[in-house]
Image (tube, rainbow, N blue to C red):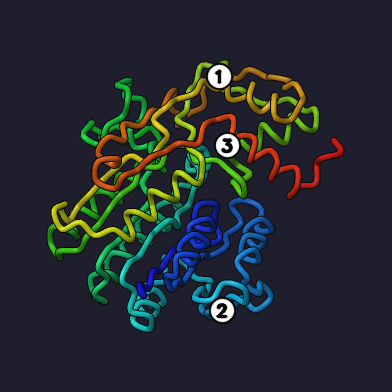
Amino acid sequence: MQKILVTGAAGFIGFHLVKNLVSKGYKIVGLDNINNYYDTALKYDRLKECGVDVDAIEWGKTVESTTMPGYSFVRMNLEDKEGIFKLCADYGFDVIINLAAQAGVRYSLENPQAYVEANVMGFINILEAARHYNVKKVVYASSSSVYGNSGVMPFSVTDNVDHPVSVYAATKKSNELMAYTYSHLFGIKTIGLRFFTVYGPWGRPDMAMYLFTNAILKGEPIKVFNNGNLSRDFTYIDDIISGVVATATIDNAALPLYELYNIGNSSPVQLEAFIDKIEEKTGKKAIKQYMPMQPGDMEATWANVDDFKKHYNYNPHTNLDTGVGAYVAWFQSYYKTNHI
């Protein structure tokens, strides 16, 4: 039975990934520092869904799930090098999937130090732990933000990404560079995944999906940046998880030690069309407040996923109608907004 460490396990993607891997019989340790970048209640509720007794959580202490055999959770910072090393020594992980990071493009303008500590120093600790404790593979989250406003569509991993437009993007680019170095110097298998606008049930409340749905249901105005002239490669969570699981569990000796892929829907959607779909699923009209472009934002994203399809049979298939419908149904159930 493979033993896998999933960092960011109380986060949106990490939560779904843990459930998927445990259902397939893998032994999983989830790690998260449960920071307050957004409401921690949602993070604790995700953990409860995985059978974690949140009242028993203490720093550095592993808590076993009561409903998902083979899953345990530990609260820890990636910056805690000694803690990360001890965890790897105790469990002997075969794979580390690093999803933990200080998220958010706009917040990186206000607090860049948090991004360097979590996204750069924390990632170095993961690579060092893999090096010293014989971890066979490190899969890590990069981001579509590394492309900046390149203007060349669709984005390909062979594109030049030397001009990030946010601190967050710069830290993700640094992850890719360090992963390459560790693959080259120490023979560690590393697979970077550039995520493209992930959405779905249990999603983050700082993302457009939540902000728009919440405001529309409450009859409040929504902020539409760049006067609506934005497009995103919205990718449903189930499609993302299938790709992450494939990279973590499929071994292909023919591929190089260092791999890098886009993971997106490869079908960009205009922001106005996205809002239209939320209106349709909520049955309410949006009150739109058009705003200028925000510093650090990208005008468009569009993933070329040809290599990912070829090497890992990646097949994103969830359309916007299905995905937005599932999100709105979850939102109304979780936040109990059916009466609005």
Residue 114, image x, y percentages: 47, 53
Secondary structure at badge 1 equals loop
| Up/down of 107 relative to 133, above or below | above
For the residue marked with disc 3, what is the amino acid? Gly
Could you tell me how far apart the alpha carbons at marks 3 and 2 are, in whole angstroms?
A: 32 Å
Residue situated in front as seen by the camera: 137 or 227: 137
Q: Are marks 3 and 2 in contact (CB under 8 Å)?
A: no
Residue situated in front as seen by the camera: 330 or 184: 330
Residue, far right? 339
Could you tell me how far apart the alpha carbons at marks 3 and 1 are, in whole angstroms?
A: 28 Å
What residue is shown at x 39% (from left), y 56% (from top)? Answer: 245
Residue on which the image places disc 2: 64
| Up/down of 299 relative to 210, above or below | above
Dot 3: within a 10 Å radius of its alpha carbon, few (fewer than 14), some, or many (20 or more) residues?
Answer: some
- Numbered tag placed on residue 292 in the rendering: 1
Dot 2: within a 10 Å radius of its alpha carbon, few (fewer than 14), some, or many (20 or more) residues?
Answer: some
> Which image quadrant is residue 340 in?
top right
Residue on which the image places disc 3: 323
> From where the camera sits, is residue 8 visible?
no
> From where the camera sits, is residue 248 visible?
yes
Residue situated in front as seen by the camera: 315 or 244: 315
What residue is shown at x 26% (from left), y 76% (from top)? Answer: 133
Secondary structure at badge 2 equals strand
Dot 1: within a 10 Å radius of its alpha carbon, few (fewer than 14), some, or many (20 or more) residues?
Answer: few
Q: Are marks 1 and 2 in contact (CB under 8 Å)?
A: no
* Chain-order first, disc 1 or disc 2: 2
For the residue marked with disc 2, what is the amino acid? Glu
Q: Classify the position of the N terminus by image quarter.
A: bottom left
> Total label count?
3
- Mark in the foreground, 3 or 1: 3
For the residue marked with disc 1, what is the amino acid? Pro
